[in-house]
Image (cartoon, grey):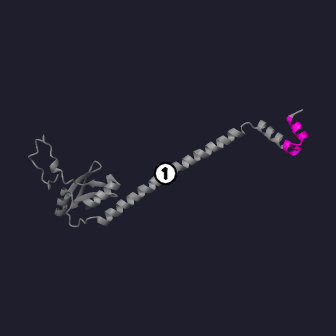
Amino acid sequence: MSLKDQLLKAGLADAKKARKAEHEKRQQAKDPNAESAQKLAQQAQAEKAERDRVLNRAQQEEKEKRALAAQIRQLTEAHRIARNGGDIAYQFTDDKKIKKLYVTTAQQAQLAKGHVAIVRLGDSHELVPAVVAEKIRQRDTAAVVVLNTRSVAAEADADDPYAAYQIPDDLMW
């Protein structure tokens, strides 16, 4: 006599529950991969969640990059110094290329002393005050092309054989 028969005789189980238990037992015997399929589904769901997190992180970084570019553009456009009447060609290097910007004599002196800086705005270059250039540099160091430091002469090398020959600020090359 089986356990099922004993439980039915004692009245602890009814025939309907016994049939249901047998049915589930047969289903598990028929499909032993049911548990592994469930594990695979959970694993696929976890992988999808990870992909979504990575994609969201990339989208967030792109949004932050665009916001920084907009801030730089706004700072540059709001504080740009007009170069109208600029007749002196100020040459500087930008990304290993020599660029030329026409400035006035006063602007050239301000560039040499570090009071004014040159900032990249799209494909062009603009003059901005040094304070604004520092704010732009905090957001993106590559946007500030020329910002001369005021203490260049103080940092002269002791062993420099040309220390006695000072380079004039208005030297054009």
The residue indicated by pointer 1 is 57
**Dot 1: within a 10 Å radius of its alpha carbon, few (fewer than 14), some, or many (20 or more) residues?**
few
Residue 140 screen position, x and y as percent: 34, 54
The residue depicted at 83 percent of the width and 43 percent of the height is 20
Name the amino acid, label 1.
Answer: Arg
The answer to whether residue 80 of the structure is visible from this angle is yes
The answer to whether residue 126 of the structure is visible from this angle is no
The part of the image, by quadrant, that contains residue 144 is bottom left
Q: Is residue 11 magenta?
A: yes
Residue 68 screen position, x and y as percent: 39, 57
Q: Is residue 2 left or right of residue 95?
A: right
Helix, strand or loop for disc 1: helix
Out of 32 and 97, give the one closest to the viewer: 32
Image vertical order of residue 95 relative to residue 107, above or below:
above
Out of 105 and 3, give the one closest to the viewer: 3
Residue 60 screen position, x and y as percent: 47, 54
Residue 9 screen position, x and y as percent: 91, 39
Out of 91 and 166, give the one closest to the viewer: 166
Q: Is residue 35 left or right of residue 10?
A: left
Image vertical order of residue 15 relative to residue 73, above or below:
above
The single residue placed furthest to the right in the displayed view is 9
Q: Is residue 159 left or right of residue 40?
A: left
The residue depicted at 35 percent of the width and 61 percent of the height is 73
The magenta-colored residue range is 3-19
The part of the image, by quadrant, that contains residue 146 is bottom left
Q: Is residue 115 magenta?
A: no
